Amino acid sequence: MQRTPIAEALNAQQAQARITVCGWVRTRRDSKGFSFLEINDGSCLMNIQVIIDETVPTYGIIKDVSTGASVQVTGELVESPGKGQKWEVRCTELTLFGTADPETFPLQKKRHSDEFLRTIAHLRPRTNKYGAAFRIRSEAAFAVHSFFRDRGFFHVHTPILTGSDCEGAGEMFRVTTLPVQGISKPENGNWFEDDFFGRESNLTVSGQLEAEMLTMGMGRVYTFGPTFRAENSNTPRHAAEFWMIEPEMAFADIQDDMDLGEDMTKYVVRHVMEHCAPDLNLFASFVDKELMGRLETLVREPFARITYTEAVDILLASGKDWEFPVSWGCDLQTEHERYLAEEHFGKPVIVRDYPKQIKAFYMRLNDDDKTVAAMDVLVPRIGELIGGSQREERLDVLEARIREIGQNVDDYWWYLDARRFGTVPHAGFGMGFERLLMLLTGITNIRDVIPFPRTPRNIDF
Amino acid sequence: MQRTPIAEALNAQQAQARITVCGWVRTRRDSKGFSFLEINDGSCLMNIQVIIDETVPTYGIIKDVSTGASVQVTGELVESPGKGQKWEVRCTELTLFGTADPETFPLQKKRHSDEFLRTIAHLRPRTNKYGAAFRIRSEAAFAVHSFFRDRGFFHVHTPILTGSDCEGAGEMFRVTTLPVQGISKPENGNWFEDDFFGRESNLTVSGQLEAEMLTMGMGRVYTFGPTFRAENSNTPRHAAEFWMIEPEMAFADIQDDMDLGEDMTKYVVRHVMEHCAPDLNLFASFVDKELMGRLETLVREPFARITYTEAVDILLASGKDWEFPVSWGCDLQTEHERYLAEEHFGKPVIVRDYPKQIKAFYMRLNDDDKTVAAMDVLVPRIGELIGGSQREERLDVLEARIREIGQNVDDYWWYLDARRFGTVPHAGFGMGFERLLMLLTGITNIRDVIPFPRTPRNIDF
């Protein structure tokens, strides 16, 4: 089927004697003997205006061409006398693909609440706001791939199904082919003997450990895939399924890691500002008036960089009445992270050298024996955008840490092999892709940057 | 840490007085008073040669610099007098990061079987073959994104966790937070009442149905994500977890679908031929002597295009003794698919208009009422690379098909909404990414194009 995407038609350099566009009707206005249609095909935020007069053979169907109906329009692309658009189509042929009964089609021309639109997640991509959000999502994903490829990183696919319970980043979903009714207790005590993998299997919470293995051969790699948390928390910031970006670099330390996190964040934000200006402008106009200022500061200024100890001092000196009290050794909560980025620095801040007790076993122990070479990138409105670290590359130190947290060194045999054979200094981080999208759009609920979000007791569509 | 990737050093335009490279030792040769190292850092297939003589302060450690050890080398980049390399490094400073005990490091300089290497999947990215395979995997993934973006497709993330059992493409894994021991029968009969999502939840076998919803607002979209099959089949072609690419186009018919499949396949193959020549050459030299000829034919010649009925006639006329007998109405098996592509046409072939009985309910019914507008792209060595169709956009026809297969129309409410409101002709397909990689590399076992493959009773790493 021949058609010109509306994004292309609106960017035409000259009038065209014959053009075909397809799309969904956003509005129809009737005058005596002719009608105006606003048509959108998803290729961009903007609609194209179509003028249809009664000489068009199928003009009789115009009464069924209501909001949400799908049409094909052939005609002449001419300069528009109206304001706000350069081109419009003078229709000579009109085909109606499908109607949308005004009595039952939920997306009539009025404002709908985000909550309502979540209940029709299958239809909300037809709205301006969600079309824009998902176009930005697409372009941001492409920017991630471009950034890493330009810097010599290879994209790797780490497994989603994992038999490892070493990841320790949160509650896991179990994956099974056993009946829900349960099975009788197996003689050898292995409940998973007859399960698909013959042992307990879960959905990954992070591809980091496997990405480290690939880094130790390929030098620089990143994952970009779905990760899962079976945490029963109904907050605007948490989803059971979300996408994560996890770069890992061999021959790199915590400084390289901070630089990479800052560079990548700036690159993606700049790329989206350049390539998605109209969509971004929708969010800046209707969702978050301060959005553009915040993004411009982010790409222009160097991120602040402080140690955890300095962060604690700032928080203690703030005079704020924290919900979670602050003292050296405490984990930073969202209220603390946002204060640092939003109020104290007014821009993103990288906090490094966290107490080892509150961080994962694989983070490299600093010489003070109290802190690890961890770094978090905190941004206004969101809090933690990136969490990363230099990884512990010393076999003996890593084994000691595993024992310290009460785990069995043998369970980590392959992870330790990377330190046993040709170990190197290396570092990496994880960035929640949805948090990046919330930063980019000003959307405050993670459910609204994911096409079909999964949260406790919600797996519709 | 400052270092020059070896890919960059080997492409230097001129000698450099001081350069630092890092990597893993592939081989060491000792002469009187000096040693040669071949070092690889994963940035490319090629090693860089390093010459270290006894004047280097740390020359005493050279005996520990064995295959697999990791080093940092600083020195002068000079033209190499040796064959096969333009540049080499005259070392002035040598740092040993990590040793690799020759007694226990499994990757000594000898040929290892693929079977053995699968047991050390965490180390095999350090070999030439798997490094090359995973670099090609990365570049092919990038080519997929570039292809679609250039054509106005948006990348969408469809859900991995699904409450829908409508997908019908294969056995599913169940996802749960209930105890493996089972629960007592719930009073209301819903075994999943206390499960995370409150109802049965599975891992997706396809993002198509959700991608269709996004297409109906965004025009052209594609997914690129993991999909799952809980099929207990131990073949070289099947994995429980694999990545699939699923484009979906509004305002498109089966012809557009075939064109897209052919264009995309050619684009990715051409891109990899252009960007991964040394890695591809490894496979052409050591894995499959006919690889380059096959790929060159694929990008040069138009794919053959026939109907299913024509395909059956060809198979019947072939005089072959099929394991699965052929008659109109039968599903094509790999032996048939490979015969058509490999022997009969000697190039990829697109087969369309399959009997409706052997295809999914959502494929558009042709006017003959016997066949559907389905199309499969079959390629030499692999068989089916792509399976797609024009989708049934007519509400009444689709509802009748759902009833015909004995399913409940109400279960498909949101899928049918897309036909109820502004339905349009649309089409799409699914391509198994690993099949594409097998085509690109000549690798015959799917376990060897996935970093950490998952198959029945195998979830190591």
Image (spheres, coloured by chain):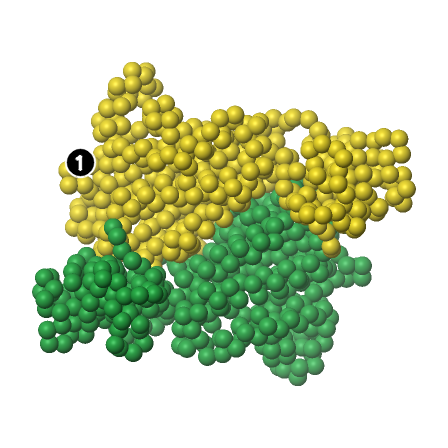
Chain colours: A yellow, B green
Mark 1 Cα shell of 10 Å, populated few (<14), some (14-19), many (≥20): few
Helix, strand or loop for disc 1:
loop
Q: Position of residue B254 (x, y in %)?
A: 71, 59
Q: Is residue A45 left or right of residue B442?
A: right
Q: Is residue B77 visible?
A: yes
Foreground: A254 or B164?
A254
Instruction: Answer left or right for A45 relative to B18.
Output: right
Relative to A218, is B338 above or below? below
| Residue drawn at (34%, 65%) of the image | B13
Q: Quadrant of residue B282?
A: bottom left
Q: Name the residue tied to disc 1.
A: A370
Give me the chain letter of mark 1: A
> Which quadrant: the N terminus of chain A?
bottom right
Q: Say how many tags the image has.
A: 1
Question: Most extreme residue toward the bottom, as rendered?
Answer: B319
Q: Position of residue A15 (x, y in %)?
A: 75, 47
Q: Is residue A436 above or below residue B24?
A: above
Q: Give me the residue at 80% from left, 47% from top.
A: A75
Question: On the rendered structure, is B30 left or right of B399?
Answer: left
| Amino acid at pointer 1 | Lys
- Return the residue nearer the eye: B361 or B233: B361
Q: Is residue B119 visible?
A: no
Q: Quadrant of residue B320?
A: bottom right
- Give the x, y percent position of residue B348: 61, 71
The quadrant of the image that shows the C terminus of chain A is top right
Seen at 40% across and 70% down, the residue is B278
Q: Does A32 appear above or below B240?
A: above
